[in-house]
Amino acid sequence: MARDAIVAALLDPAGTLGLGEPAWDLLIRQGRRANLLARLAHVLNDAGLLERVPEAPRQHLRSALLMVERQHLAMHWEVNCIRLALAEAIQPVVLLKGAAYVMAGLPAAHGRTFSDVDVLVPRALLDQAESRLMIHGWQGSHHDEYDQRYYRRWMHEIPPMRHISRGTTIDLHHAILPETARVKVDNAALLGAAIPLDGQPGLFVLRPVDMLLHSATHLFHEGELGNGLRDLFDLDGLFRHFGQTPGFWEALAPRARALGLGRPLYYAIRYVRMLLDTPIPERVVEAVASFAPTGPVRALQDFCYRRMLRPHHASCRDWGTHPAALLLYVRSHWLRMPFFLLAAHLTRKAFTRPKLPKLEPGLGKDAGQEG
Amino acid sequence: MIISALPAAELDDRLQRGELLLDIHPFVARLRSDIPGLANDLASMYQGFEVLPADRFADFHVAVTRERGPRHWIKPQARFHFDGRPSFIPLPLHQAFAMLEWGLNWCVAAHSHQFLIIHAAVIEKGGRAVVLPAPPGSGKSTLCSGLIQRGWRLLSDELGLYDMESGLIHGMARPVNLKNASIEVIRAYAPDVVMTAPMPDTSKGTVCLMRPPADSVARRREAARPAWIVLPRYQRDAAPSMAHQGKARTFMLLAEQSFNYDIQGAVGFQAIGRLVEQCHCLEFTYSRLDDADQAFQALLAGEVG
């Protein structure tokens, strides 16, 4: 399978030299739809090639980069506000995903866009954390009673909370997977191993191995891969960066086994190697082979993920795109809850007005915040 | 090639296939639509604009398409797409052309941070530009439409693209958006103007687009140096008055009326500072377009500011 233009450019920025107008046109489109335009700008800039990009596409790359720089600045501010609201009473407050990459200064944050801040707190302190956030100006969303119950009873997070004046969103988690998920993760072990964040007393991030496992778990339990390719590049960035830390590779498979997250680790390694050529030591590949699903399941997953871990653009679709999207959607619900609960939930959703997928920020003045 | 030189069938065909590249300098938009009549409005409103070959780079891939499904028999709707991504809310089919225009404005405002993008009308005469930044309801579009019928060149009725390095403002000289009562006001003031059919029941009321003057279109690549910042204020039956406005207040107004001031950071702060420094800052209260014509002539003659 030939690489998509955006993947080829990110893996080999020098290959963009000499691209013609139609090729740049496609590259900007794919980059935008995959939320990887700023990442491309960053990679080109690092390679000293940004100035050699033709003027018109360069303006889009620069704009995307500027936008991300502002988002990162805003993230620092936002995280500080969260710290002031929570850290005194809640221990530990762990930043997840994008927020963690930015605040820990990881290369995975380069050129990465955000829509919200994800935070993990101990289950026992969840109510307290929620009320402290409310006192400091965050308001709950999803006022529908069923949604509230659905979130609170079955999910691993409460409904997103939005700050009344800044308009920023926080996702407050008490676990990394839903209560009802087939895989039971030892969340206490994750919280217990979290490491303090420099310069932000009271705030923590997951330790490298756990951060990677969480990133993998999140991507490979997700039903709608709106940012699938971007998230795969996150994994690539984490593997490449943490791979240089002594002990990282050795700890990976045993920790995955202990937490019950072997399968997502297997998928992460399979698809970063297959799609992004991420260097993974052979002994690690062998170590995770025992987490692999059976042959037919693996073939089906390959069918799905080879299609869904691509930009959401017309140039990256084929006959299998829709079936793959549907399969992953069903699978994610299957993983998320037991059959009878799932049946009840989907029946209810079928008979109530379906929520439209959030595809585009409103065409208004505050537009441009991308997921 | 000029859009008007394209045979109707060819224009329609390119639009259907998504291969209509419209030069809206400093951008290129690639347009696709399957909505009957849209090609006509496009040819009429963008008369004098160039179309480019389909293999050129386009800044924005924009589509306005008919919604499928059973609903479309009862209530036909159109949806806007940007780079293949559908917008959240569809609009009634008869508003498709307005949707295209607003969609294009959004594309520019949300993705072109090489400029400080000011929500303002911009007009020019004798090499000097007037920036009319405006909160809604101030009569900015009406004033701008009137003045461009009296010899001012249209740069934009909505988006001032301020190049922070050169200090020049670009417009695109795209069609002017008229709302509600101002449609009749402009028809009466300049009976020769060409407008689209009125599109009722939009979120802004009844909307018409008006073809920009031919001379403005011919000179649309010429950026202009701003000399005045005038805050328009329509007030029923008011006598015309051109009053000085504090630089600090004008600064705040411009910052508030910019789409991407928050993204520009310190560079944006300094840019607005320089802009306000080099311009006469005024507030213009008016009720009649004839008064406005005179007041702006006086401005040009150096009698005010």
Image (cartoon, rainbow, N blue to C red):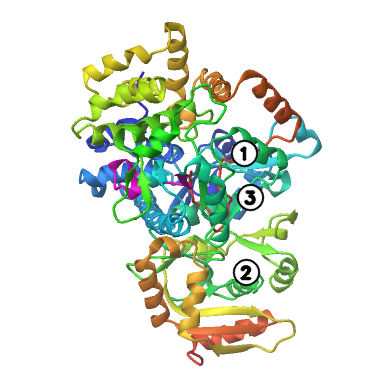
Mark 3 Cα within 10 Å, few/some/many (few <14, many 20+)? Answer: many
Quarter of the rendering containing residue A316 = top left
Q: Is residue B101 magenta?
A: no
The quadrant of the rendering that contains the N terminus of chain A is top left
Q: Residue at x 79, y 34 (%)?
A: B73
The type of residue carrying mark 3 is: Met
Measured Cα–Cα span from mark 1 to mark 3: 40 Å
Mark 2 Cα within 10 Å, few/some/many (few <14, many 20+)? Answer: many
Question: The magenta stretch spans which residues?
Answer: A101-119
Q: Chain of mark 1?
A: A
Q: Chain of mark 2?
A: B
In front here: A16 or A350?
A350
Q: Nearer the viewer, mark 1 or mark 3?
A: 1
Residue matched to label 2: B141
Residue B147 shows up from this direction: yes
**Element type at mark 2:** helix
Quarter of the rendering containing residue A268 = top left
Q: Which mark is residue A152?
A: 1
Q: Are marks 2 and 1 on the same chain?
A: no
Q: Is residue A106 magenta?
A: yes
